[in-house]
Image (cartoon, grey):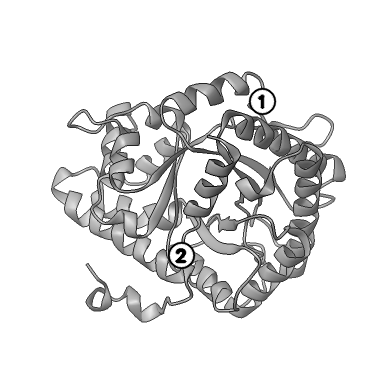
Amino acid sequence: MDLVSMTETARALVAPGKGILAADESTPTMAKRLGGIGLESTEQRRREYREILFTTMGIGEFISGVILFDETIRQHAADGTAFVEVLREHGVIPGIKVDKGTTPLAGFPGEVVTEGLDGLRGRLAEYVSVGAQFAKWRAVISIGDGRPTAPALEANAHALARYAALSQEAGLVPIVEPEVLMDGTHSLERCAEVTAATLRSVYEQLTRHRVVLEASLLKPNMVLSGADSPVQASLGEVADATITVLRETVPAAVPGIVFLSGGQSEQDATARLDAMNRRGPQPWELSFSFGRALQAPVLRAWVGDEANRDAAQAAFLHRAAMSGAARIGSYEPEMEAPSASRL
């Protein structure tokens, strides 16, 4: 894709009422997810589960794109149709996770940096050849005693920028994901401080590496109290703190921000996104790129039984519809009641 096409793709991914499904769990992560419902993780079972997601009728109304894993982008539906084509038939844009996970950052105990830059140019070209139109790379930042350090922020921001530049060179829209983990006892204010420092470092590096911001997206955490903090911020406090940090750090040239759910419950992630979109227009679109917040109810409904396929797809479409409503600030908790749902 040329720059104009990449910019159009970036904007299509944050179209009104739509967001991204993150279905890019690694094989070990999928083993944990399937193990949680009592199933062994095999390639066939992973394929069957993801086919349930991708063949759900009506998902194109709420889902703009899907982030795939290396295994998944090469797989096919039971009728032989490549998953990339299945998604396109629903009007959904296929994307690909290209990082190779984290490794300890030498000299900085408790901090990590993401691997995957070696050979990335060639891998990106291959992903383009099989139909990917955007890519994603995740950096992980933890809050703790003396963490994060400036070198850890710089190392992760530098890797994100190199990935983003290579992605645009290949014609792929880069989604830049610097996730500040919610693990810990830190306050909302501390999360805001760390998130702001992280994003400043990221955008400094993106600029230095000549990444075209108009053809990129940001996938950040929401600003939250630590999961083990004795004081949990309210819905409004989370929305206000998150928007404040973003307005201080994210250039207006970025078309959209697609929040990760990052360990939040599906209802919490949805309600917080809705609260932000009720704050009025922002310089960028505020959307979602949820994994667990879209998939957890699907796994619970399916439990590996083909007889539950319809129920699992209904659960997915419902969560997608709730997230789509939050995307435009029209979500209400009452919509979660079965009698109020569209299913």
Indicate whether 299 appears above or below 335.
Answer: above
Residue 31 or 55: which is nearer the viewer?
Answer: 55
Quarter that holds the C terminus = bottom left
Could you say which disc has been placed on residue 230 in the image? none
Q: Residue 231's quadrant in the figure? A: bottom right
The residues tagged by marks 1 and 2 sit, at their Cα atoms, a distance apart of 33 Å
Give the SS element for disc 2: loop
Spot occupied by residue 111 in the image (x, y as percentages of width and height): 75, 40
- Judge whether 233 appears above or below 147 on screen: below
At 50% across and 46% down in the image, what residue appears?
9
Please give the name of the residue rendered at 43% of the width and 77% of the height, measured from the top-left corner. 330
Looking at the picture, which amino acid does disc 2 mark?
Answer: Pro
Q: Is residue 18 left or right of residue 260?
A: left
- Judging depth in this view, the residue of 289 and 311 nearest the camera is 289
Q: Which residue is mark 1?
A: 117
The picture quadrant where one finds residue 277 is bottom right
Residue count near mark 1 (Cα–Cα under 10 Å), binned few <14, some 14–19, many ≥20 = some
- Residue placed under numbered mark 2 in the picture: 16
Residue 196 is situated, as x and y percent measured from the top left of the image, at 77, 59
Q: Amino acid at mark 1?
A: Leu
Percent from the top left, x then y, of residue 62? 37, 60
Pinpoint residue 292: horizontal percent, then vertical percent: 44, 52
**Whether residue 285 is visible:** yes
Of residues 291 and 124, which is closer to you in this image? 124
